[in-house]
Image (cartoon, rainbow, N blue to C red):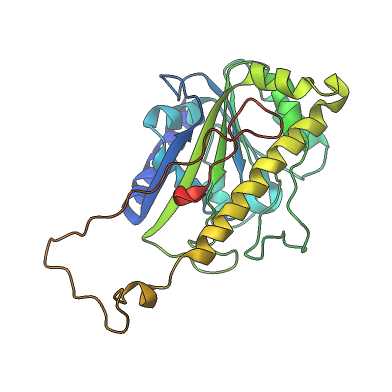
Amino acid sequence: MLRSALVFSVMWVLKVLSRTFYRHDFQWIGPTPKKPWADIRLVVFLNHTSLFEPLFIGAVPNSFIWRLAAHGVVPAADKTTDRPLVGLVFKFIAHHVIAITRQRDDTWFEVLRKIDPDSMVVIAPEGRMKRANGLDLHGRPMTVRGGVADILHAIREGRMLIAYSGGLHHVQIPGQMPRIFKKVQLRVENIEIRDYIAEMMKNGGEEEFKRNVIRDLEHAATRTARTTNRRRAKSPSRASRTKRWSGGRPRPPTLSGETRPRAKSPSAPLALKRWSGGRPRPPTLSGET
């Protein structure tokens, strides 16, 4: 109980700091239950780009933070938990934070042993961080590892959140100082775990289950990354945004307290389906099509 209270306190302070220094763009996608934060057993976080991703805690309710503090199970890379300052923070993001070696060894089986009927597992299944060039530290394409399929088998029921990060390289590129007062984007899909397992079993049964899960999540992560990069490539520079439609001169300043109307962004094309059918594709961010 003492650790749960300590973890909750750390995460609540982080939530306050996140909401103070960053703007959160959070949206549900696809069919969403009336109580979307209830009965969450697994959170799958895609597009892992920065160790500053705990900033996304600013978009979740306190009830979710308490679940994380009391019943959370988070596998974290040992090279992350061994860092002097960041590692200390990561050790207090959940009730059970287990350092793993990224191999299928005793550290991974310790994660599986910690899962009980009340547990909520949070995992970044890509297993490593994407650099600003879209590849990992060693220049290899990002892929999803199969451990998430083991966790699905261990949990079996409840609900799963698939969280699509818009990326945080505009906040902090690995190895560089962070920037504040930026927008952070997150789209979240709420899925019944039993239905997802059945869907992944349709093509090949138990033998192909892990491959189907990997393929499904890689498809989602790849599309999210592509749409994010395309959105940023099309984003006009600050200088170009200050030009008039007639060209040349900057726009006149707004009066004190005056705001200009902004065009509404179109909603994401939720009717589009994934290759596996059934669920909507991951969203395009900022209303991009």
253 above or below 12?
below
Tell me where residue 196 sits by quadrant.
Answer: top right
Tell me where residue 108 sits by quadrant.
Answer: top right
The structure residue drawn at horizontal position 46% and vertical position 65%, both measured from the top left corner, is 235
Furthest-right residue in this view: 207
The structure residue drawn at horizontal position 40% and vertical position 55%, both measured from the top left corner, is 183
Where is residue 68? Give x, y as percent.
50, 31
Is residue 264 rendered to the left or right of residue 36? left
The structure residue drawn at horizontal position 63% and vertical position 20%, both measured from the top left corner, is 193
Is residue 214 rendered to the left or right of residue 3? right
Where is residue 126? Give x, y as percent.
70, 45
For the residue pair 91 and 268, the one nearer the viewer reads as 268
For the residue pair 167 and 88, the one nearer the viewer reads as 167
Evaluate whether residue 211 shows in this view.
yes
For the residue pair 232 and 133, the one nearer the viewer reads as 232
Furthest-front residue in this view: 246
Tell me where residue 159 sits by quadrant.
Answer: top right
Where is residue 268? Give x, y as percent.
48, 41
275 above or below 91?
above
Furthest-bottom residue in this view: 248
Is residue 75 rendered to the left or right of residue 229? right
For the residue pair 30 and 139, the one nearer the viewer reads as 30
Where is residue 85? Give x, y as percent.
54, 56
Evaluate whether residue 48 shows in this view.
no
The structure residue drawn at horizontal position 75% and vertical position 24%, both measured from the top left corner, is 200
